[in-house]
Amino acid sequence: MSNDTLILVVDDDPDLVESVSMRLESEGFQVAKAYDGVEAWDRIKDARPQMLILDVMMPRKNGYELCDELKKDDNFKDITVLLLTAVADAIPYTTYTHMDGKTTLADDFIPKPINLDNLMEIVKDNL
Amino acid sequence: MSQSDPVMKPPGEGRSALFSRPSVLVVDDEKRIRDVCAKMLAGDGHEVGVAETAEIGLRMVKNRHFDIILLDLMMPGISGIDALVQIRTAHPDTVVIVITGYATLEHSIEAMKKGAFDFLSKPFSPGDLRVVINRAVEHISTLKDIATEKSRMRVMINKLADGVMTTDNQKRIAQANPAFLKMIGYHGPRPIGRTADEIVGIKSLNDMIDRVLDAPEEESIEVTEEVCLEQDAQNAETVLGAQCVPFRDRLGRNLGTITVLHDITASKRIDKLKSDFVSMVSHEIRSPMNSVLTQLKVVLDGLAGETTQKQRDILGRASEKIAALIRLASELLDLAKIESGLITREREEIQMAQLLEDQVAFHQAQAQAKSIQLSLEDLPELPALMANRLNLEEVFSNLIGNAINYTPEKGKIIIDAEVEGDYLCVRVTDTGVGIAEEELERIFDPFYRVKNDKTRFVIGTGLGLPIVKSIVDAHHGLIRVESEPGHGTTFSVFFPCTP
């Protein structure tokens, strides 16, 4: 499946950004990378991605703040935001439920710890 | 003691006061009676005084204390009855025995009504006297014991580091020790007799007392709560463990309440530190390990170039280990969250039947993979519970997951629920390997895992059951386990029903 969808991956762990990017690219997506919330804003303005995979705990500007600003800005609110969030999935068979009421502005959640196959499913569901 | 007071010293005077017998004053106008009584009582070890009229007797009583007074009723001058009334008024703890002539019953009855302890009818033998005196001595020593006990008790309660307050059934304060007043921050006049509402400025404490007072007398009730107090000084928070129970008499009638406060600030602070530490560590471990896992996955999936089968095998095993470590870190984090009380705060109404159905459906695939028959019994109507949904899911997920892990292929797991008294009870019964008796008491310890040839292949962290227990405890519930090695195990979880 090849397409020109551009996905911006934002996480302060470069290794994680790299792995996620490699997987996305292997599925034919265009990928941009950023390592904190402020840098992410610059990329968004430059590159106009269709989708954001956004970590929550980051230096300078965290994922909640960035998501909030984005969703309240008429120029950018159409960008799909998938929030990477540590959820109560500690025990593998517990249902995934996000715990933080503040994250409702995001379009969907990718539970942490990240499972790349699961991540791909969520990305495709939200296209 | 003035020189004119004719007080006979008993033999052995000067021994420790502990051994001294009560002092006796004999008031009688008949010299013979005074002499006989004095001689006999002194011989028995009493300190004895004598007076020939009520006037002299009253004067002697004013100068010093007598434990027992033998008082003739028929005397010239002030009558014995009048003397009795004066003595009883001025010295309520003095025991008065009246001596009556010719067995005049009416006099004796009147004297008893006016507070005499006993009476002796003339003529009486030394034996009669001894019996009456001994009875009085016993009475005095009992009174002394009670007084000592009372003052000891008061000293003990006042020295307690825990706060203790007792109220009557009108919520008036009967007793409050200094620790209690300090904990509630009360500095003012004596609070005895005033209502708890006036003195205790902490609403939750007053509510607890009200709840106990409102409880029907046949109901056994104990209200426990943690009370947080903001302190202005260093903005530090004080946490009190408060317990309130009814004060009932032997017939079970409500006399009032007893409230005990225990300062648990320090242990709360340590708990919090511990939890913070654990969650910091597991965050710092979990995130990088997750990163490693995704890296391995990328290589395994061939996204970083061709790999050989051997390389994939090795990376696959490494991934499994990393995944297990991530799970361990996650469970530590969960336990820390539960212990710090973060999770259980948000409660909602839970329909247990629905929750159990979901859990059974959720684990069906896992059970079928081992050809285990996992089923939910037909449930009776169950009351709704106020609980944290995530927590309850975690409890049953763990119990059912464990049952599947520790039950051999083709086994059976049955989930059942019913109301038992004030509790909703859910049972998870399996036909698994069971737990030996000596292991039973340890299975709720963090990191403890039953290790034997049957459990060696089960991967786990040893945190599942401690998490279950923490959650059940946080919901004021109970968990029980019964097991027969080789035959199976039943875990019973009890949650208090919403009133």
Image (cartoon, rainbow, N blue to C red):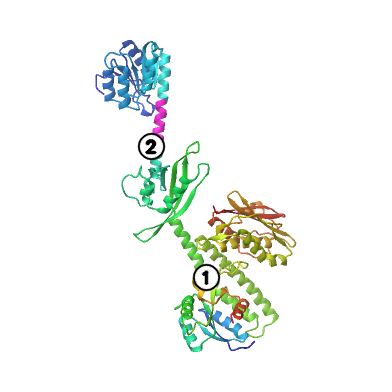
Closer to the N terminus: mark 2 or mark 1? 2
Question: How many residues crowd around disc 2 within 10 Å: few (fewer than 14), some, or many (20 or more)?
Answer: few
In the displayed structure, would residue B409 be above or below residue B17?
Answer: below
Frontmost residue, B67 versus A78: A78
Q: Amino acid at mark 2?
A: Ser
> Which residue corresponds to the image point at 41% horizontal and 48% vertical from the top-left?
B161
- Helix, strand or loop: magenta stretch: helix
Is B219 inside the magenta-drawn segment? no
Q: Quadrant of the N terminus of chain B?
A: top left
Disc 1 marks which residue?
B283
The magenta segment: B139-152
Specify the subunit that label 2 lies on: B
Across and down, in percent, residue A47 comes to 51, 88
Q: Is residue B363 left or right of residue B117?
A: right
> Residue lying farthest left?
B3
In the displayed structure, would residue B48 be above or below residue A19?
Answer: above
> Which residue corresponds to the image point at 53% horizontal and 42% vertical from the top-left?
B218
Across and down, in percent, residue B490 comes to 66, 54
Specify the subunit that label 1 lies on: B
Disc 1 secondary structure class: helix
Frontmost residue, B47 versus A88: A88
Q: Is residue B453 visible?
A: no
The mark found on residue B102 in the picture is none
Q: Is residue B70 visible?
A: yes
Disc 2 marks which residue?
B151
Residue at mark 2 shares a chain with residue at mark 1:
yes
Determine which quarter of the picture holds residue B72: top left
Determine which quarter of the picture holds residue B128: top left
Across and down, in percent, residue B21 comes to 38, 24
Q: Amino acid at mark 1?
A: His
